[in-house]
Image (cartoon, rainbow, N blue to C red):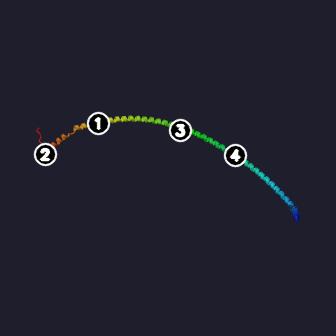
Amino acid sequence: MAKKQDRSRSELSSDNEDANVDKIRDILFGGQMRDYERRFVDLERRLTKNIEVLSSNFEKRMDRLNNFAKREVEKLAEQVKEERKARRDDGRKGTKELKELGQQVESWCVELEEQIGSEAKDLRGILQEQSEELSGMIHDTHEQLSKSLADETRSLADGKLAREDMAALLTEVALRLKKDFKLPDA
C-alpha cells in the first residue's frame, strides 16, 4: 500500500508539475497560442469555404458539361437519324430508278430483238431473191456456154481434117516423094 501511495503522490506531483508547466506555458505563449489557434480556425474556415465554393463550382461546371454533352449527343443522334432516313429515301429512290432503268433496258432489248428479227427476215428474203436470181443467171450462162461450146465443137468438126484423111494424105505425100506413086490419068 505504501507503494500505491508513493505512486499516487508521484502522479499527483507529476500532474501538478504538468499543470504548472501548462500555466507557465500559458503565461509565456498563451497569447500567441490563442492567436495561432484563431488563425488556424480562420484558415480552416476559409479552406472549408473555398473547398465548398470549388466543389460547388465544379458541380455546376460538371452539370453544364453534362448538359452540353447530352445536347450534343442528342443533336448527333438526330443528325444520324436524319442521315439514316435520307439514305433510306435515297436507297428507295435508287431502287425505283434502277427498276425503271431495268424496265426501260428490257423494253429496248425487246424492241431491238424485234428489229433484228425483222431485219434478219428481210435479209433472208433479199438473200433468197439474190440466190434465185444468181441461180437463174448461172443456168442461163451455163446454157449459153454449152450452146457456144457445141457450136464451136461443130465448127471444129467441120473444119478439121479427119485422122483417116490425114493418114491418106501423108501416105500420098510419102509415096510421091519416093516417086512410087503413080498418078491416075485424069
Question: What is the C-alpha distance between the residues marked 3 and 2?
Answer: 105 Å
The x and y percentages for residue 67 are: 71, 46
Determine crowd level at label 3: few under 14, some 14-19, many 20+ residues with C-alpha closer than 10 A: few
Does label 2 or label 4 sit earlier along the sequence?
Answer: 4
Looking at the image, tell me whether mark 1 or mark 2 is earlier in sequence order: 1
Residue drawn where x is 13% and y is 45% of the image? 178
Q: Residue at x 68, y 45 (%)?
A: 73
Q: Label 3 amino acid? A: Gly
Q: What's the amino acid at mark 1?
A: Ser
CA distance separating discs 1 and 2? 47 Å
- The reply to whether dot 4 and dot 3 touch (C-beta < 8 Å) is no
Q: Is residue 163 left or right of residue 57?
A: left
Which numbered dot is residue 33?
none
| Image quadrant in which the N terminus is located | bottom right
> Which three-letter amino acid code belongs to the residue tagged 2?
Lys
Instruction: Describe residue 12's horizontal placement relative to residue 65 as left or right.
Output: right
Give the Cα distance between marks 2 and 4: 146 Å
Tag 4 residue: 70
User: Which residue is labeled 1 in the image?
Assistant: 146
For marks 1 and 4, give the one nearer the viewer: 4
